[in-house]
Image (cartoon, rainbow, N blue to C red):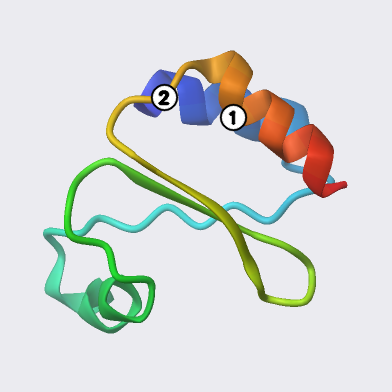
Amino acid sequence: MEPVVDRLYSEYGERVHFAVLNADDASFSEQTKEFGVQFVPTFVLVDSSGTEVNRYVGAVEEDVLSGELDALE
C-alpha cells in the first residue's frame, strides 16, 4: 500500500494532511489506540473538524481512496 499512499500524497499533499503511523512502532501506540487501529493497513479519513468520516481496514483500491479524498475537500 505504500506506493498508493505515496501517489496520493503527491496528488493531495498540498490540500490534505497525511499522517502515516507504523502500528508496530511503540512511539505511536497512543495514536493507534485513539483511532482504534487493530489491523494493518487501516485508513482513517477525518474531516477538517476532526470527525471520522470513513474507515477502511485492509487493502483499498487507489481510486476508492482518491474519491474519498476528493469528497473531503
- Position of residue 15 relative to residue 50, above or below, is above
* Crowd rating for badge 2 (residues with CA inside 10 Å; few <14, some 14–19, many 20+): some
Q: Is residue 26 above or below residue 54?
A: below
Identify the image quadrant of residue 40.
top left
Q: Is tag 2's residue or tag 1's residue first in the polypeptide sequence?
A: 2
Q: Residue 30 carries which label?
A: none
Label 2–label 1 contact, CB within 8 A:
yes
Tell me which residue sits at (81%, 34%) in the image. Answer: 70
Estimate the x, y position of residue 31 in percent, counting from the top left: 35, 77
Q: Which of 16 and 70 is in front in this view?
A: 70
The amino acid marked with disc number 2 is: Val
The quadrant of the rendering that contains the N terminus is top left
Mark 1, residue position: 65
- Is 15 or 50 nearer to us in this picture? 50
Query: Does residue 15 appear left or right of residue 3 in this picture?
Result: right
Q: Residues within 10 Å of mark 1 (few under 14, many from 20)?
A: some
In this rendering, position of residue 4 left or right of residue 24:
right
Q: Which residue is drawn at 28% across and 71% down?
A: 32
**On residue 60, which mark appears?**
2
Q: Distance between the residues labelled 2 and 1?
A: 7 Å
The x and y percentages for residue 47 are 73, 63
Quadrant location of residue 38? Answer: bottom left
Q: Quadrant of residue 23?
A: bottom left
Nearer to us in this view, 41 or 8 = 41
| For residue 22, side relative to residue 5 (left or right) | left
| Place of residue 41 in the rendered image (x, y in percent of width and height, measured from the top left) | 27, 41
Disc 1 residue type (three-letter)? Leu
